[in-house]
Amino acid sequence: MNRAGGVAGAPPWGVRTVQDVWSTHEAWVYECVHCEHIWNEQFEVRHSDDGHSHDGVAYERHGQRCMTPWSDHVCPRCGAQNVKAVAGAFGRHPIVPEARRGNELELVFRLRRLHAW
């Protein structure tokens, strides 16, 4: 017991410790190696600090706790378990944007000359 009447090593009575807890959102891109199907999933990541320089991380998908994004995924199309996971910004995108028509590009250059864009 310490002088304040509490347990040795514990904070004094009436004093509470505060944990830092914060959330982030992550998007992951998955690609099936078997059928080449590509899909995205969104995760909410909850980080917490235990006060001793250790970080705890919990992943949630659709409000339910889940495994880490890079483990135990099954292709929704063919059911294969050979799936590659890549963080959202680095994933391969299946749709290639269409080339701009000449008149749209000409409009962009005209707006740049007028300092309007």
Image (tube, rainbow, N blue to C red):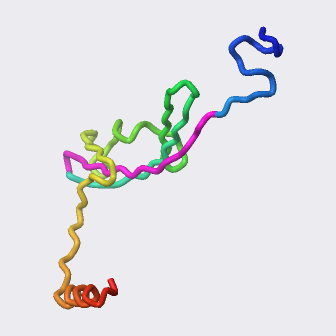
The picture quadrant where one finds residue 115 is bottom left
Image quadrant occupied by the N terminus:
top right
Q: Nearer the viewer, residue 105 or 46?
A: 105
The picture quadrant where one finds residue 22 is top right
Q: Is residue 29 magenta?
A: yes
Q: Outermost residue, top direction?
A: 1
Q: Nearer the viewer, residue 35 or 16?
A: 16
Whether residue 19 is situated above or below residue 13 in the rendered picture = below
Q: Nearer the viewer, residue 3 or 64?
A: 3
Q: Nearer the viewer, residue 75 or 41?
A: 41
* Residue 109 at x, y percent in the picture: 22, 86
Q: How many marks?
A: 0
* Residue 7 at x, y percent in the picture: 75, 12
At x 20% / y 85%, what residue is drawn? 105
Kindly report the secondary structure that dominates the magenta region of the rendered protein. Answer: strand
Whether residue 26 is situated above or below residue 103 in the rendered picture = above
Whether residue 59 is situated above or below residue 52 in the rendered picture = below
Image quadrant occupied by the C terminus:
bottom left
* Residue 97 at x, y percent in the picture: 23, 72
At x 50% / y 32%, what residue is drawn? 56
Q: Is 37 situated left or right of 28 in this image?
A: left
At x 20% / y 91%, what residue is drawn? 103
At x 35% / y 50%, what residue is drawn? 28
* Residue 9 at x, y percent in the picture: 68, 14
Magenta stretch bounds: 19-35
Q: Is residue 15 magenta?
A: no
